[in-house]
Image (tube, rainbow, N blue to C red):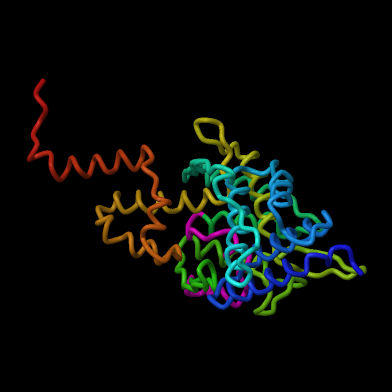
Amino acid sequence: MRSDAAPVALEAAIEHFLVHQRVFGRRYHTEEYLLRALRRFVARRRAPDLSAAVFEQWCAAHRHLSPNTRRRRQLLVRKLCLFRRRREPRCFVPDPTGFARPRPYRSPVIVTSAQVASLLRAADKLVPSQHFPLRAAVMRIAIVLLYTAGLRRGELVRLLLADVDAHNGILCIRESKFHKSRWVPLSPDACLELRAYLRQRLKAPYDQRPTAPLLCNGGSSYGRVGWHAYTGAAIWQGFRTLFDQAGVRDAQGRRPRLHDMRHSYAVEALCRCYREGGDVQTQLPKLALYMGHVSIVSTAYYLHFVPEVAALASERFDRRFSHIIGPVVP
């Protein structure tokens, strides 16, 4: 008998909980991984079930993580225990007052168009390798799609060749966050970049089937070379290298995160609306639809009042209302 099979009641509760959550369309892949790791943790302690003492030990084992990460995991376990209590009134439920305190998330580093140009030049200098034969081309198109289309990292790495209409410049984003799919039209310049990338990507010996990943790298198994999709971690590693090589930092010397490219896209879209004299409020629902948000509340999270936005808003206000206010007399 395996030593990690001891907490039978906990394992059954986890199974029922996952089934229940997936009935509502939630994927719960990460949550399943975390809960099964919890079950193994309880088994290694030779405890018959999850208890307050075991939960405290489990929390102590995660002290190396950030407070927000620890709190999310603690809330997940509490959610499981509350679900379990419906059938087992005496089961343990953690007290949330002892959970890690949330901290404000780090403000994003907005990447400017000049810095994007530096990233593209750095990408063109990348050297291919056996496992990354298209490294330069992949990183270049990744920069373009993240900055001009505002894609999430997961959306980028999950793109297949069948999802790309290079002739019309349209991407099909399938079953992304909140199980929403959408069509993403590209700008003319981004479309040209995509066509240039596909001229390399669709050559032999790379996988050209419609179900093959758009961003592919090389791999070997038992002496045979295969083609696989880039992982999110590999894309981030590539961007981190480019950020360092191109010297992309903010005024405080902070390196951008990969998700900051999505923030940068939203801010640039806002600036473009101001420059063109558009109505920002009427454009927000369109931006929300383009970014795959369920409401403009989610989109507003990405619209930061950076100095350029402040200057553009002030200029527009001055053009429209300076004749009413008049010059300021000292």
Image position, residue 155 (x, y; %): 57, 65
Image position, residue 39 (x, y; %): 75, 61
Quarter location, residue 240: top right
Seen in the image, is 308 located left or right of residue 292? left
Number of numbered labels in the structure image = 0
Q: Residue at x 77, y 72 (%)?
A: 205
Looking at this rendering, what residue extends furthest in the front direction?
A: 90
Is 44 covered by the magenta stretch? no
Seen in the image, is 268 located left or right of residue 77? left
Residue 214 visible here: yes
Q: Residue at x 92, y 69 (%)?
A: 1
Residue 156 visible here: no
Image position, residue 328 (x, y; %): 11, 27
Q: Which residues are magenta?
A: 147-169
Image position, residue 301 (x, y; %): 41, 51
Q: Residue at x 27, y 43 (%)?
A: 313
**Above or below: residue 164 compared with residue 219:** below
Seen in the image, is 271 located left or right of residue 183? left
Q: Residue at x 52, y 50 (%)?
A: 261
**Above or below: residue 84 compared with residue 63:** below
Q: Quadrant of the C terminus?
A: top left
